[in-house]
Amino acid sequence: MFRAELDSIDIRILRALQADGRMTNVELASRVGISAPPCLRRVRRLEEKGIIEGYHAILNGPSLGLDLVAFCMVGLRHQSEANLKSFALATADWPLVRQAWMVSGDSDFLLHCVAENLTTFQDFVIEVLTANEQVDTVRSMLTIRQVKKHGLVEV
């Protein structure tokens, strides 16, 4: 099922950390049923292998004044490797773009955007996104509400 060699304890560790990445190693060890030293060794091994990529606080956008969430499907003028790489690099400089994927199908990129309001988002689309020389088409979808929120992968 998994590419990496994981046993049932590793999987329990990943599930527990994905649910609460702030718990202490002692608490984690207790939850997965092993002592603290081998638990810490396992966590470090999972980090070294790149299975655990990092630890982050999940922030509440609306409480910070970021009320708008939108997705943009972006089509490029040309899909050469250089153009794809250039556009991918450009997304790193756009604070409104929180996540970006290169995709197949009708579009070349899917951008997850978060903004203060509709005006801020519209300004980004018009002044930044469509103004990018690589961009041919942009289709935007404004969200109504999030109905599911889980970790990015199921373990």
Image (cartoon, rainbow, N blue to C red):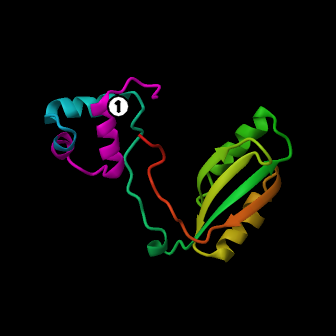
The percent coordinates of residue 99 (x first, y second) are 58, 52
The percent coordinates of residue 145 (x first, y second) are 56, 70
The percent coordinates of residue 126 (x first, y second) are 77, 66
Question: Disc 1 designates what residue?
Answer: 46
In this rendering, the answer to whether 9 lies above or below 77 is above
Residue at left 41%, top 33%?
51
133 with respect to 39 (left or right): right
In this rendering, the answer to whether 67 lies above or below 136 is below
In this rendering, the answer to whether 51 lies above or below 63 is above
142 with respect to 1 (left or right): right
Residue at left 72%, top 70%?
123
Categorize mark 1 by other alpha carbons within 10 Å: few (<14), some (14-19), many (20+).
Answer: some
Residue at left 70%, top 58%?
72
Is residue 108 magenta-colored?
A: no
Q: Residue 8 is drawn in which quadrant?
A: top left
The percent coordinates of residue 75 (x first, y second) are 80, 50
23 with respect to 155 (left or right): left
137 with respect to 115 (left or right): right
Is residue 3 or residue 121 the one in the foreground? 3
Q: Which residues are the magenta region?
A: 1-29
Q: Residue 49 is drawn in which quadrant?
A: top left
> Secondary structure under badge 1?
helix
